[in-house]
Image (spheres, rainbow, N blue to C red):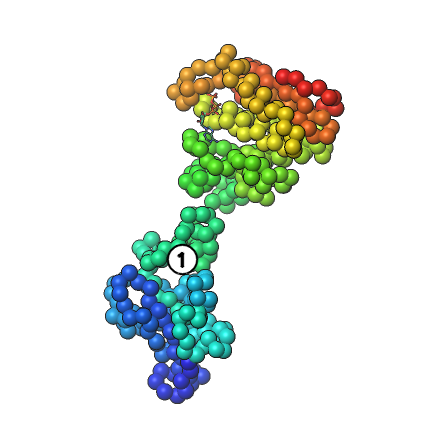
Amino acid sequence: MSVKDGDGTTSQDGKAYELQIYPRLSLETASCCTLRVTKEATTASVIQDAAATLGLDASKVYVLAEVKECGGEEWVLESTDLPVHRVLLWPRKAQDQHSQKEGFYFLLQERNNDGSICYVHLPSVGNEQESKRLVARGFLPPQQEDYEDLCNLPVLNEDSILDNLCIRFQKKKIYTYAGSILIAINPFKFLPIYNPKYVKMYENHQLGKLEPHIFAIADVTYYAMLRKRVNQCIVISGESGSGKTQSTNFLIHCLTALSQKGYASGVERTILGAGPVLEAFGNAKTAHNNNSSRFGKFIQVNYLESGVGARVRVTHTHTPCPLMSLPLLPQKSCCL
Ligand SMILES: Nc1ncnc2c1ncn2[C@@H]1O[C@H](COP(=O)(O)OP(=O)(O)OP(=O)(O)O)[C@@H](O)[C@H]1O
């Protein structure tokens, strides 16, 4: 950008400023257009002038993005933002005419009907972090807000709860808290959120600090038992096929991983292996589940004072839901 005194369009301070605007559009256009604008020119008026100068389709919507570093982050300006004010914050050298590869310029891009930016070279938005960054910088419309804990819903009724669970489920977030209760929605497909990295990630974290997860429940229970030296109990409830057995398996997986810490003893394999045998006495094929456990299940995991899993008992009961209890056992025994 360069400043021209007293000629052409001038602002209140008597100066006209030149903006270097590079179009990044699907159709071939001039590589750069230099606009002379006042300090008070808004993004909307600059876009209008640039589109007219470049002979672009006036029926389309365009956005102006500020680029500082070449190849670095681009920030979409609001229509009321003042581009010259942005330029005045650039280093002195960058305010003069310079080539695009030196950075510090504006990009003109097309906006889609849904509010997202029409990218010629779309950066990968595969991962959530990248798309969050693009939303923050104005390149993607904000995602529908969802609440990790139903207690934080601004309006609490059946519709808002179901809407929130639905929005989260569409984002592949199957877990949601309701205070210290975890709601799980069966995805009926594999989600890569149960590997050891996740056990580590949730280890010794306060509930609610991280994204809701079944491992967070296992972790909080395990550490509460060690800290308070009081038996802990996890109740899993839900209709047939809702994922109670899977959830129990994930809990066992996490609890054994937390308590083993290098003592590979195959406790998890033993517990999980016992499940199908016991279930065989009470399983049936239902409309929702071809391996439905008709009776409740009671799993008791006993621990040594050191926190190492020592004893496990898995029993089928006639209670309507499985129950897990984690008594602290100061004994050196290991049986099933
Ligand atoms: N978190 C999950 N991720 C992937 N698939 C899941 C998950 N939870 C459940 N499922 C799928 O749903 C099926 C039924 O789940 P599960 O057997 O755990 O239900 P259940 O509540 O124990 O049913 P029932 O009460 O009839 O025994 C599983 O076989 C699995 O395919």
Residue 42 lies, in percent from the top left, at: 39, 71
Residue 82 visible to an observer of this rendering: no
**Residue under the point 43% across and 42% down:** 171
Rendered view: 108 above or below 221: below
Image x and y of residue 178, in percent: 54, 37
Residue 78: quarter of image: bottom left
Choose top left, top right, bottom left or bottom right for residue 218: top right
Q: Is residue 19 left or right of residue 306?
A: left
Q: Vertical placement of 41 versus 115: above or below? A: below
Q: In front here: 151 or 253?
A: 253
In the rendered structure, which amino acid carries the disc numbered 1? Phe
Which quarter of the figure is the N terminus placed in?
A: bottom left
Element at badge 1? loop
Identify the image quadrant of the C terminus: top right
| Residue labelled with disc 1 | 139
Residue drawn at point x = 71 percent, y = 19 percent: 333
Q: Residues within 10 Å of mark 1 (few under 14, many from 20)?
A: many
Position of residue 330 measured from the top left corner of the image (x, y, whole percent): 74, 24
Q: Nearer the viewer, residue 198 or 221?
A: 198
Furthest residue in direction top, as rendered? 281
